[in-house]
Amino acid sequence: MFEENITPLPLDIFRLLRDFIKDYCGLFFNDKSLFILERRLNRRLKLHSLKDFREYYHFLMYDAKRDDEIHAIIDILTVNETYFFRGLTQLTAFIDEIMPMIKEEKKTKKINIWSAGCATGEEPYTLVMLILEKGGFEDWDIKILGSDISQRALQVARSGTYRKNSFRTTDNYFIGQYFQKEQSDRYIISDRVRKLVDFSSVNLLNPFKIRLISKMDVIFCRNVLIYFDDESRKKVIENFFDILVDGGCLILGHTESLVSIPTAYSLKHLKNDMVYQKPVKPHPKSLEEVLNMKFADHGISIKKRLDNDNATK
């Protein structure tokens, strides 16, 4: 057998490509990752009949088909490793603590949940199954958004068809209750789960796209920010903060933390886990409350002051 002819990726062009990808979607590759990009992107050179990576970089910057190519390399470079019921302690905190808290505090029977970086869709579908099993939300309007930047991953998510590898921690009860077996190793999600999830392509660094998303009560973004540098993480976290309702919760992966990022979130300790919460803004004070505070030092309330004024007239 002959070895594949690999076009070398010079360090200076690697850094241009690396910075281009980081600025576009937040994915960061350090210098040790040069070999990864070199191997994964070599076929793109051959596909477009380009002689080297310098020409490829120029293609990405200026060619009329650059947008299609960017989507293609994002599919190649992103990691879409996930499965149903991943991270059970966080899921338990969500269904047994966060959802009841939202139910108690909500003035309207409407809940929006965002699974950001959902890959092939196992996470948002898991959230639906948990809600259906929990019960008590039958007359609530619950919408779950599953988003990813990879078009290939979203295609799988929308199909709702999965192989056994996606069920590595799934109890047989859920498989029998919410899936239909298609072939020997393929299962399709039931319509009652599918109808509660909408999938969309979202670049987490694009504030304009994110502003089009409805306000969220809960945001899951687990095992996504580990692939970003600090600058990109901060931008994403700020975008999440803007779209969360007051008191809304952000759930990150266990290996992810906001310790190194200055934020306005507070850390909420739950029985089963910890989450980041957007603080609730204090309600604006009425005019009477403001005036009472002003006259408090004089030992008189505004009502008593007005009563005294009226008595002297």
Image: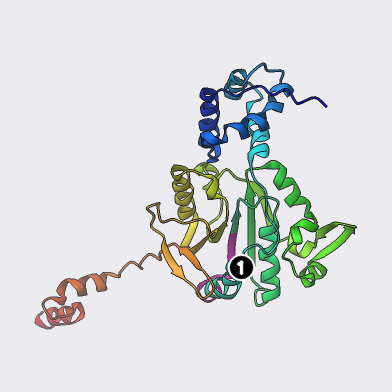
Between 195 and 310, the residue placed more toward the observer is 195
Residue 259 horizontal side relative to residue 30, left or right? left
Residue beneath disc 1: 91
Helix, strand or loop for disc 1: helix
Q: How many marks?
A: 1
> Is residue 152 shown left or right of residue 91?
right
In the rendered view, would you say 249 is above or below 42?
below
For the C terminus, the quadrant is bottom left
Q: Position of residue 113 (x, y in %)?
A: 59, 61
Q: Where residue 50 sits: x, y (%)?
A: 68, 18
With respect to residue 68, does 183 lie above or below?
below
Q: Is residue 184 magenta?
A: no
> In the current view of this chain or complex, which residue is farthest to the front?
1
The kind of residue tagged 1 is Leu
Left or right of 291 in this view: 263? right
Q: Compare residues 191 and 274 and report the one nearer the observer.
A: 274
Does the rendering let one see residue 99?
yes
Residue 313 lies, with reference to residue 184, above or below; the image says below
User: Is 310 left, or right, of 118 in this rendering?
Assistant: left
Q: Residue at x 61, y 50 (%)?
A: 117
> In the current view of this chain or complex, which residue is farthest to the right?
183
Classify residue 231 by image quadrant.
top left
Q: Look at 33% across and 66% down and name the residue there.
A: 284
- Residue located at (58% from left, 65% from top): 111
Q: Which residues are magenta?
A: 103-113
At a point 58% along the width and 23% down the height, the residue shown is 57
Q: Give residue 161's quadrant in the image.
A: bottom right
The N terminus - image quarter:
top right
Percent coordinates x, y for residue 99 in the rendering:
57, 71
Q: Position of residue 144 (x, y in %)?
A: 64, 59
